[in-house]
Image (cartoon, grey):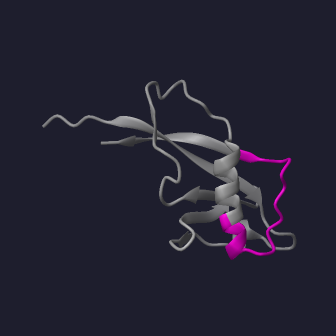
């Protein structure tokens, strides 16, 4: 059997936990199909947010060791604003955007 894979870029974003709440200790992994996101606790009392579906056209990567790792404005807003619908106490900082584009293998 010969199975081939391709690399696909998928952005995730980090936001600080709401003030006074230890999301790292007391938060939980949430899959939100209505908003097409998932979020979970992350080290440093932050929340990691990703999309359940790829909200943008798929970005196939030719070289998984050399690809765009910058946060895109549209994807950041889509994911972080959707998370804020579920966590209204979440403050959104437009100047402190943290995220990464990671590559996953697709068959």
Residue 52 in the image: x percent, y percent?
A: 50, 61
Position of the C terminus, as image quadrant, is top left
Residue 104 or residue 9, whichever sits in front: 9
Position of the N terminus, as image quadrant, is top left
What secondary structure is the magenta-colored segment mainly?
A: loop
Toward the left, the furthest residue is: 1
- Left/right of residue 75 with respect to residue 7 in the rendered view: right
Q: Residue at x 68, y 41 (%)?
A: 71
Inspect the magenta stretch and tell me whether residue 58 lies in it.
no
Residue 25 in the image: x percent, y percent?
A: 71, 70
- Say whether residue 6 is visible: yes
Q: Residue at x 70, y 73 (%)?
A: 85
- Left/right of residue 99 with respect to residue 35 in the rendered view: right
Residue 84 in the image: x percent, y percent?
A: 72, 69
Q: Residue at x 53, y 65 (%)?
A: 36
- Left/right of residue 9 with respect to residue 98 in the rendered view: left
Residue 42 or residue 33, whichever sits in front: 33
Residue 17 in the image: x percent, y percent?
A: 78, 65
Q: Number of labelled discs? A: 0
Inspect the magenta stretch and tell me whether residue 88 lies in it.
yes
Span colored in magenta: 82-98
Q: Residue at x 55, y 41 (%)?
A: 102
Res 24 quadrant in image: bottom right
- Say whether residue 42 is visible: no
Look at the picture and state if 18 lies above or below 52: below
Look at the picture and state if 35 lies above or below 51: below
């Amino acid at each position: 059997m010969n199975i081939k894979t391709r690399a696909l870029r998928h952005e995730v974003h980090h936001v600080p936990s709401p003030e006074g709440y230890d999301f790292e200790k007391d938060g939980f992994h949430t899959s939100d199909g209505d908003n097409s996101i998932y979020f979970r606790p992350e080290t440093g009392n932050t929340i990691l947010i990703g999309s359940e579906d790829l909200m943008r056209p798929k970005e196939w990567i030719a070289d998984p060791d050399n690809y765009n790792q910058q946060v895109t404005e549209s994807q950041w807003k889509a994911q972080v604003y959707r998370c804020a619908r579920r966590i209204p106490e979440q403050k959104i900082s437009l100047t402190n955007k943290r995220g990464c584009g990671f590559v996953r293998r697709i068959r």
